[in-house]
């Protein structure tokens, strides 16, 4: 595929190749000099219309580690604020010879529009509630690193599934790589349509979700996307759905704990578990850079 917008066009073989190549990129990051000339002469634009720490920084570092030029388009300081359209904005950036875009936007489908307007490879860095494919890839990479394979593994994802592009992308990706996904949250935050995806089940019972799981992922309650009525009380949510030591006892011994970040500590995840020995949350962050190097390399020069 020319873009990474979601996983619709991506075969398990291509996805596995991306993860394998992330292993190579990880070796580059372990060297004293963390730079290779792979993308020399190419320009990557990170266009973020919504806040980010991990995704933006890791993409910019990933591109620079491979010697690409990086232009960071700050939507909040741009002529969008004077009424310029997304289309005109993208056409301006493309006129400066940008070779690929990394796009985050609050509207689902915005990355598709950038692909259409620019004619360049586009990586979706999170669009509304729809997809965040590089997050799911780094989650898959982290699970594979731990267990050697995704095949036959069970991944429980708990929290605000309704507003989560991370849940949606993992529900698309992990079964393609042989894992089973259990999505769990209160009924108001659990859209039933996701149960139609192959390899995905949904439940409102956190113990049922976590029982025998190899990886347990907590998701952030996205209060900025909740205009009321989804939760009676945060304390009640934490009582039932928080990923904590008590709930983890239901998981497979040796299960790992994930969170895409940013975390609401002691709400969807207890601090002792977030910082505990089963946590791979900082490993996810670290792996993000290697995975994003692999994706940039694949789309810019490695597709053939
Ligand atoms: N997980 C994630 O996308 O984090 P950021 O919003 O900080 O990029």
Image (cartoon, rainbow, N blue to C red):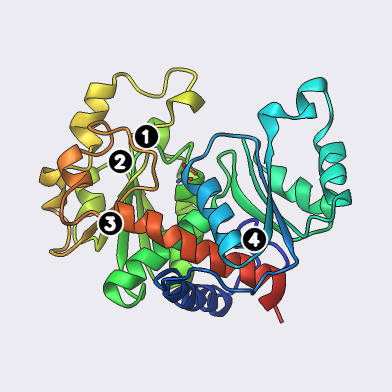
Q: Residue at x 59, y 74 (%)?
A: 11
Location of residue 153 in the rendering, given as x and y in whole percent from the top left corner: 30, 69
Q: Which residue is mark 3?
A: 280
Q: Which residue is mark 4?
A: 4
From the Cβ of disc 1, is ligand 1 less than 8 Å away?
no
Closest to the observer, 294 or 27: 27
Disc on the earlier residue, 3 or 4? 4
Q: Name which quarter of the figure residue 89 lies in.
A: top right
Q: Which residue is mark 1?
A: 187
From the Cβ of disc 2, is ligand 1 less than 8 Å away?
no
Disc 4/disc 1 C-alpha distance (Å): 31 Å
Disc 3/disc 4 C-alpha distance (Å): 25 Å
Q: Which residue is mark 2?
A: 204
**The N terminus - image quarter:** bottom right
Disc 3/disc 2 C-alpha distance (Å): 25 Å
Q: For residue 225, say whether it is visible.
A: yes
* Mark 1 touches mark 2? (CB < 8 Å): yes
Location of residue 136 in the rendering, given as x and y in whole percent from the top left corner: 47, 57
Q: Residue at x 76, y 23 (%)?
A: 81
């Amino acid at each position: 595929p020319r873009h990474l917008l979601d996983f619709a066009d991506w075969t398990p073989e291509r996805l596995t190749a991306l993860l394998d190549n992330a292993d190579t990129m990880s070796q580059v990051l372990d060297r004293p000099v963390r730079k290779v000339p792979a993308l020399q002469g190419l320009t990557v634009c990170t266009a973020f219309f919504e806040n980010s720490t991990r995704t933006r920084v890791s993409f910019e570092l990933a591109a620079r580690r491979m010697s690409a030029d990086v232009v960071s388009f700050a939507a909040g300081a741009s002529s969008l604020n004077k009424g310029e359209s997304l289309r005109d904005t993208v056409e301006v950036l493309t006129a400066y010879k940008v070779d690929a875009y990394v796009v985050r936007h609050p509207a689902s489908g915005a990355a598709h529009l950038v692909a259409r307007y620019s004619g360049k490879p586009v990586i979706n860095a999170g669009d509304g509630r729809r997809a965040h494919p590089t997050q799911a890839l780094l989650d898959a990479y982290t699970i594979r690193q731990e267990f050697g394979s995704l095949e036959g593994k069970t991944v429980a994802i708990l929290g605000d599934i309704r507003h989560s592009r991370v849940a949606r992308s993992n529900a698309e990706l992990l079964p393609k790589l042989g894992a089973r996904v259990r999505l769990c949250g209160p009924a108001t935050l659990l859209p039933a349509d996701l149960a139609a995806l192959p390899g995905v089940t949904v439940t409102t019972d956190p113990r049922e979700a976590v029982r025998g799981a190899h990886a347990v992922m907590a998701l952030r309650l996205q209060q900025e996307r909740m205009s009321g009525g989804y939760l009676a009380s945060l304390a009640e949510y934490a009582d039932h759905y928080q990923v904590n030591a008590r709930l983890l006892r239901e998981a497979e011994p040796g299960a790992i704990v994930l969170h895409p970040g940013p975390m609401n500590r002691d709400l969807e995840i207890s601090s002792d578990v977030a910082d505990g020995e089963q946590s791979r949350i900082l490993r996810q962050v670290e792996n993000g850079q290697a995975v994003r190097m692999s994706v940039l390399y694949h789309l810019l020069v490695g597709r053939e």
